Image (tube, rainbow, N blue to C red):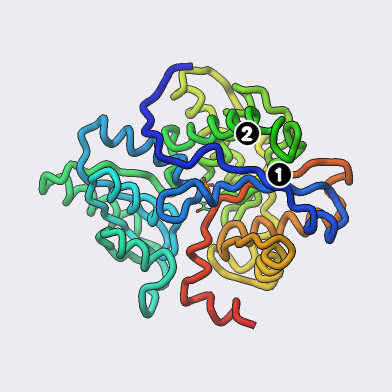
Amino acid sequence: MISIPRIRFAHLPTPIESLPKLSALLDGPSIYLKRDDQTGLALGGNKTRKLEFLVAEAQANGARTLITAGAVQSNHCRQTAAAAARFGFDCLLVLSGEAESSFSGNLLLDDLLGAQIVWASKEDRDQVLQNTFKAAWDSGKRPYLIPYGGSNPTGAASYAFAIKELLDQAGSSPLSGPPDWIVFATSSGGTQAGMMVGARLFGYEGKILGISVDVPAEKLQHHVANLAAETAGFLGESVSFKAEEVLVDDTYLGGGYGVLGPPEIESIRLFAQSEGVLLDPVYTGRASAGLVDLIRKGRFSRGEKVLFWHTGGTPALFARRYHDQLEK
Ligand SMILES: *Cc1c(COP(=O)(O)O)cnc(C)c1O
């Protein structure tokens, strides 16, 4: 494996906790939590790991501005804005979706962190992103483009190393050994692709199940398999992945991206009230609702160890758009 540039600023290793009360309530497998909501960098989340490599690459390229895009309540954009502030870049964020009547949640934080926001409709977000990049380039801002969700081989590589971290810590953690399952929220696929590369390179033999929050399973499986192969290549390893090997469940798409429904609300309350753990309305709320449903349907056996990988997102709990539904 070749070594790639990295700036170490994430709080690692993130802790592993057991969730005994939740496990007893659901009367299924033993449930554990990997706290990537606590990776540091302006309230944490899975993008912090990716940014350790993306920011290092931007620096190596002599960039002065970080540009990325996402939804109004994007965690990726908030964490990119924080990384830009910390490492001395300007930050341009192209945000799409229903504009909020006033800044709250991640959007409030983007502004506090000094990012400049460019609004776009969902349909022309790609075009606006390209135009924004070109204008920044032409005016000498030396922009570096981070893709949606930080999901290119550079960003995804971070989750290969996260699997190594898990294997190194598992024996002396509450898990006392590798979990049988890793379950988590998947969307732009970088997290899952990186985990699959890590499993192959470092020898994790359990299952890696992504609960899709917005993309049909077949599409995501192909995308993740390709990205995983590219990521392995980026690390100097030749590994191929078949789409069928990528485990994605798209049963829980509900009302679509960012739409909070009864399953997410139930699961957010369940984790909060049984274990004092805060999830988020868009990603971990949905993925955990899927996990809870799969446990109720008997998908896991009682002796199995299931690690729910908390990918962050809690600032979106404070987005005004979710208040009415989250309030009792
Ligand atoms: C971005 C994000 C994900 C999805 O990760 P991908 O690598 O895009 O699949 C999951 N959870 C949270 C909280 C996120 O912000």
Dot label at residue 294: none
Query: Image height check: is 5 above or below 254?
Result: above
**Residue corresponding to mark 1:** 307
Q: Position of residue 11 (x, y in %)?
A: 48, 42
Give the amino acid at mark 1. Leu
- Residue 247 vs residue 108: left or right? right
Q: Earlier in the sequence, mark 1 or mark 2?
A: 2
Percent position of residue 109, x then y: 37, 63
Q: Which quadrant is home to the C terminus?
A: bottom right
Q: Give the answer, above or below, for where 76 lies relative to 123.
A: above
Which residue is pictured at 61% across the width and 57% down the height? 284
Give yes or no for contact between labels 1 and 2 (Cβ–Cβ under 8 Å). yes
Q: Nearer the viewer, residue 318 or 92?
A: 318
Q: Nearer the viewer, residue 3 or 133?
A: 3
- Badge 1 local density, few (<14 within 10 Å), some, or many (20+)? many
Instruction: Identify the residue position indicated by label 2 in the image.
Output: 166
Instruction: Indicate the position of residue 141 as horizontal and vertical percent values.
Output: 15, 46
Mark 2 belongs to which amino acid? Leu
Find residue 269 and report its horizontal and vertical position in percent: 68, 69
In which quarter of the view is residue 285 placed? bottom right
User: Which residue appears at 69% of the width and 62% of the height?
Assistant: 271
Q: Is residue 189 left or right of residue 27?
A: left
Please, what secondary structure does the residue beneath circle 2 have? helix
**C-alpha span from label 1 to label 2:** 10 Å
